[in-house]
Amino acid sequence: MDSEAGVQGPGEGSADTTPGTSGASSQGKVGPSTKKAPLKRKSNVSTGAKAKKRKKAKVNRPARLSYTVQEGEDMLLVISNTSQYDNLAWRPKKKGTRKKKLTKGKAKANQTKKKKTVAAKPKVANNPPIKKVADAVLHQPERGTDHRWGHSLPEEVLVNIFQMVVFQDGAVPFLCRMARVCQLWNAAASSPGLWRRVSVGFCWIEPGKTQLPKTEMKIKDTVNWLAQNRFSQLRDFSLCHWKKNVDYAVEVVSQSCPHLRSLTLSYCSGVTEKTFQSLGGNSWSLESVNVQYSEFQAEGLVAFLESSGSQIRQILFTHGPKNDRLLAAISRGCCPDLELLEINTKLDSGYCQLPICIQGLQSGCPKLKTFRMLNVIPMHKVMRNGPDSTSGFPLLEELCMATTSVSFMTDKDLRDILFGSTKLRVLDLRGCSRITPSGLATLPCVELECLFWGQYFNSKVALSSPKKGLHMLTEKWSGTLQQLDITNHLFTEEDLEIAMSYLAQATNADSLRSLNLSGTKITPPALRLVIGQSTALSYLNLSSCRYLPRGLKRVYRGQEDIRQLLDKLE
């Protein structure tokens, strides 16, 4: 250590490198010498001059660990000691290191000194780079503890971990990225069980530009490779926002995936008859077809249902100009085992009507369990050669007729749909302002669980006269009702109090979980009655309730929040 400290290069601040001295002292010229020059330079500074203070030699100290371990009650906390600038060639300048402006006399001498210090090179043997020493210390703990932990896990454990992520975020692009980590992760990500549900979105294209031929070829090659190497157990397949190559992708998947059960084309365009022809010729296990918000040829889907409709259980599509043909084909009995039928439209599409023959649909789909018409107004029509009487929908469990515009559905129209539906569980009539409580009370279903009857989008509801009869509904379904929504209904205070009393006196008072009374005339006594008995209530909407005190008109979520409301009411 002493030998290393005694030898210093010119770059380490020694006092030998006085500017302007090149073999001559400041007092006189020195003659030639026959002796060999010593390795260490001698000082040429005069004895009368003030000697400069020599800097202390640098001492190599062992680098500190990059972490600190602190023991808690039930865990070990590992706190990092490193900075974001560690192991970097560039470091931010420290504060207060800005040099003062030099005078004109010293500027020239400092330039000469800088040139000499730059030319000098430190010895490599005695001064190892700091970066290498720090890296060795930082990576030393990993060798004995968690180095390459991902390569030592069993493949079955990785598959289970990947399964959790796939269930939440989907197989693509997660599995594609995990397969590029190492061979073990590639084998785990290639497990066919992880690729049973796949949704593929289209790559982004700059607006105003078309897809290049090379990119289109890469897309086709990717679809082929996935179908041959990953989709052996594919069950549910979705294409989102595809503008081209939809026919090609569906054809390849249908030919390579014999277990395909569900196909979803969302916001796609260019869906021709070829798409449905490939499904009819190859996908014998297909049960669900969803083409909502996509542009497709209705003739191709009608032809597919006429040939292979007996295997279809679910159909979902968006109302369009020629979709009445599709509904007519379903009513003729092309899908006798159909269980779910959903017809929707965009929320900003305005008033939208769809001619529909309820009797033909009841005879053509006797096994229907879910019937939804979202923002679509049904126009009842009679079939000329249709049956005179049907058994209705005996297996129907959910009916949705919600709309954002004016609905002309009456009690008679609702009765024609549900006269044979004794197993109905969910009834959604949001926006249907012409339905009355007496009409709902006459429905044959006796175990209704969810009733959504709020008036959200109808501006004329506030001008209607006060209603009565809500107590008939709560009396009939008080034992089974779990969710009730009567937003903006102008029932009287007395009727609301009687209705809430029936809910509180029910034998299964803990069945009610959600109650929406927004915009109603609910009073504190009626509210206190139902909250005190409904122990399972976890959602309560009291916004815009004018008969309640200030500070209570809001949405309550959670049983604790509702319990605090009960304390305020008492």
Image (tube, rainbow, N blue to C red):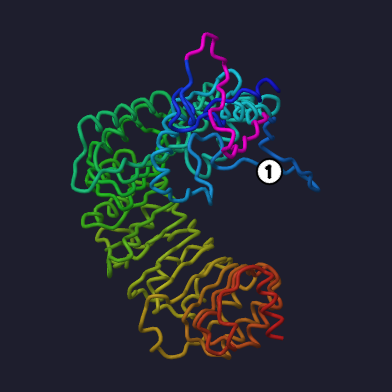
Residue where numbered disc 1 is placed: 79
Question: Is 432 rendered above or below residue 312?
Answer: below
Q: Is residue 563 magenta?
A: no
Quadrant of res 144 = top right
Which residue is outermost to the right?
Answer: 73
At horizontal 67% and vertical 77% (from top left) the residue drawn is 531
> Does dot 1 land on a helix, a strand or a loop?
strand
The percent coordinates of residue 84 (x first, y second) are 55, 42
Q: Main secondary structure of the magenta part?
A: loop
Number of numbered markers = 1
Question: Is 318 rendered above or below residue 556?
Answer: above
Q: Is residue 508 visible in this depiction of the protein?
A: no
Q: Is residue 559 visible in this depiction of the protein?
A: yes
Amino acid type assigned to the residue bearing label 1 in the image: Ile
Quadrant of res 385 = bottom left
503 or 566: nearer the viewer:
566
521 or 136: nearer the viewer:
136
126 on left or right of 107? right
At horizontal 49% and vertical 26% (from top left) the residue drawn is 190
The percent coordinates of residue 508 (x first, y second) are 69, 69
Magenta part of the chain = 32-60
At horizontal 70% and vertical 41% (from top left) the residue drawn is 78
Question: Is 109 rendered above or below residue 422?
Answer: above
| Mark 1: few/some/many CA within 10 Å (<14, 14-19, 20+) | few
Quadrant of the rendering where the C terminus is positioned: bottom right
Quadrant of the rendering where the N terminus is positioned: top right
Q: Is residue 38 magenta?
A: yes
186 or 331: nearer the viewer:
186
9 on left or right of 431? right
402 on left or right of 503? left
The percent coordinates of residue 490 (x first, y second) are 48, 86
Quadrant of res 282 = top left
